[in-house]
Image (tube, rainbow, N blue to C red):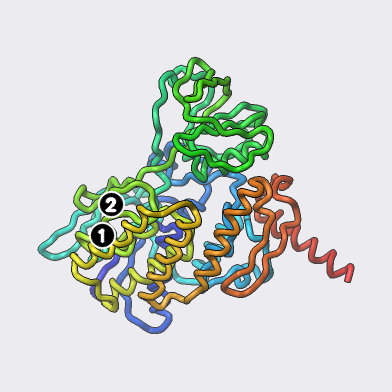
């Protein structure tokens, strides 16, 4: 292993999971390959690393992150908890089930700070191009050190693509939009609800981003929020001030026209129309080409590029599970790179993918999709020594979460769940979510400390 080299593109949750997987072996005295992780941002965390920038970053690169202020977890933290690093271990006390972004970023960072992973990461470095040489079976990466404005290349035996797929916007065109007098942006460039206070806002899309941005803007003072869907509405019971309408057809000035014949005047438009899987640093024959779904074709076990298994993709699925799924994938990928896991022949891998894809095509609704991804996680856990967790219990929580959202889209974040890692029941947040306008870690944790002190005094 000491002569092998592994390149990881991206130091978000997936890339960091891969570093942790190797480090788990190192701690046990196992010799691992030389590992280099390339991260084009100045810090780790990927999508959870908030930046106020849109368009281009400090060094002229397209901004990677789509994170915005006031984002709170839209699923229970108990469903994404690392099985080798609990929320209890990090915060030393119970916290609520739906933390804000700074708190989740602190949790992600806490696990990696306990490790030596930083020594493997080259920040402000972006991959420009990749070649694979069949003769020597090595990848050549052409890299840019953005800070030093220096281009260089290096060879590796394995390539792990962990650059995510929520950073290249899918931006549709609607007739007349060029003459719309208000602001038009994609959710990728949305940085907070403040600018839409007292405005009539139109969101195009029926995805999680449309749902969350719509509710955030309503919460922070938008006059009205209208969501326009292509095929199916989100379908929850919206409060007065939020509504769903069929697909936008065209604009006439600041008037939007919809497929049901209705029209309305708006101040601003946000396209919540999804993202593209984009890998501009990869040649065509190595590029994963897929729409966002629960099981992309071309990758065996959702990880190994079938035409060339030394090319590994992490976190490319649509996601119910997140951090713990990335971990499970990374542990399996690690064992393959360590030559501990032997993959079946190419035709057998193809058959396995086809079996999963057939099941994917027959899914019926969200609850079925949760079971599908739960079974996928179980499959991964059976292939490695990643610390086990109760997947069935997590699946139950996901389904309860889906029901809570249908019951009340504004209050579901006030619910609490129990960790499958520690058995700890989450605390209720000190303020109802709709009344909580401060998403800072300081308020979230310090206020909670004050409440606990007052309770102790009362006792």
Residue, far bottom: 29
Q: Which badge, 1 or 2, comes first in the chain's sequence?
A: 2
Quadrant location of the C terminus in the rendered image: bottom right
Residue, far left: 135
Tell me what residue is drawn at x 33 percent, y 54 percent. 296
* Residue density around tag 2, few if under 14, some if 14–19, many if 20 or more, within 10 Å: some
Quadrant location of the N terminus in the rendered image: bottom left
Tag 2 residue:
288
What is the CA distance from the residue labelled 1 to the residue labelled 2?
Answer: 8 Å
Tell me what residue is drawn at x 45 percent, y 65 percent. 374
Kind of element beneath mark 2:
loop
* Residue density around tag 1, few if under 14, some if 14–19, many if 20 or more, within 10 Å: some
Relative to 160, is 171 on the left or the right? right
Residue 305, numbered label: 1
Instruction: Write down the quadrant of residue 224 in the picture.
Output: top right
Query: Do the numbered discs 1 and 2 sit on residues whose CB atoms are within 8 Å?
Result: yes
Residue 419 in view, yes or no:
yes
Residue 39 in view, yes or no:
no
Residue 79, numbered label: none
Q: Nearer the viewer, residue 201 or 19?
A: 201
In the rendered view, would you say 200 is above or below 349?
Answer: above
Q: Position of residue 241 (x, y in %)?
A: 66, 32
């Amino acid at each position: 292993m000491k002569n092998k080299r592994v390149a990881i593109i991206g130091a978000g949750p997936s890339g960091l999971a891969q570093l942790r997987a190797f480090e788990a072996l190192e701690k046990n005295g196992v010799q691992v390959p030389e590992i280099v992780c390339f991260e084009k941002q100045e810090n780790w965390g990927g999508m959870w690393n908030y930046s106020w920038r849109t368009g281009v970053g400090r060094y002229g690169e397209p901004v990677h992150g789509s994170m915005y202020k006031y984002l709170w977890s839209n699923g229970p933290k108990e469903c994404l908890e690392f099985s080798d690093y609990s929320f209890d271990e990090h915060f030393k006390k119970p916290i609520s089930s739906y933390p804000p972004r700074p708190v989740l970023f602190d949790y992600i960072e806490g696990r990696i700070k306990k490790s030596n992973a930083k020594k493997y990461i080259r920040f402000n470095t972006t991959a420009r191009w990749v070649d694979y040489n069949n003769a020597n079976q090595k990848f050549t990466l052409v890299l840019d050190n953005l800070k030093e404005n220096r281009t260089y290349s290096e060879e590796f035996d394995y390539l792990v693509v962990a650059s995510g797929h929520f950073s290249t916007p899918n931006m549709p065109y609607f007739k007349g939009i060029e003459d719309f007098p208000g602001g038009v942006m994609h959710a990728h460039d949305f940085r907070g609800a403040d600018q839409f206070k007292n405005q009539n806002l139109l969101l195009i899309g029926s995805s999680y981003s449309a749902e969350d941005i719509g509710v955030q803007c309503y919460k922070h003072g938008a006059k009205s929020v209208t969501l326009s869907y292509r095929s199916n509405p989100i379908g929850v019971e919206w409060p007065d001030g939020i509504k769903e309408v069929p697909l936008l057809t065209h604009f006439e000035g600041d008037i939007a026209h919809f497929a049901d014949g209705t029209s309305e005047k708006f101040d601003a438009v946000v396209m919540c129309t999804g993202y593209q899987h984009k890998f501009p640093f990869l040649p065509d024959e190595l590029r994963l080409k897929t729409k966002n779904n629960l099981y992309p074709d071309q990758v065996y076990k959702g990880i190994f590029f079938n035409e060339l298994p030394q090319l590994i993709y992490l976190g490319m699925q649509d996601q119910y599970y997140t951090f713990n799924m990335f971990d499970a994938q990374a542990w399996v990928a690690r064992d393959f790179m360590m030559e501990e896991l032997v993959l079946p022949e190419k035709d057998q891998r193809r058959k396995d993918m086809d079996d999963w894809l057939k099941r994917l095509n027959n899914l019926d609704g969200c609850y079925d999709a949760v079971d599908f991804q739960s079974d996928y996680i179980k499959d991964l856990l059976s292939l490695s020594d990643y610390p086990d967790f109760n997947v069935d219990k997590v699946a139950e929580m996901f389904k309860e979460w889906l029901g809570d959202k249908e019951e009340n889209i504004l209050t579901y974040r006030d619910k609490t769940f129990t960790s499958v890692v520690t058995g700890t029941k989450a605390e209720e947040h000190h303020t109802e979510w709709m009344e909580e306008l401060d998403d800072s870690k300081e308020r979230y944790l310090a206020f909670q400390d004050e409440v606990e002190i007052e309770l102790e005094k009362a006792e």
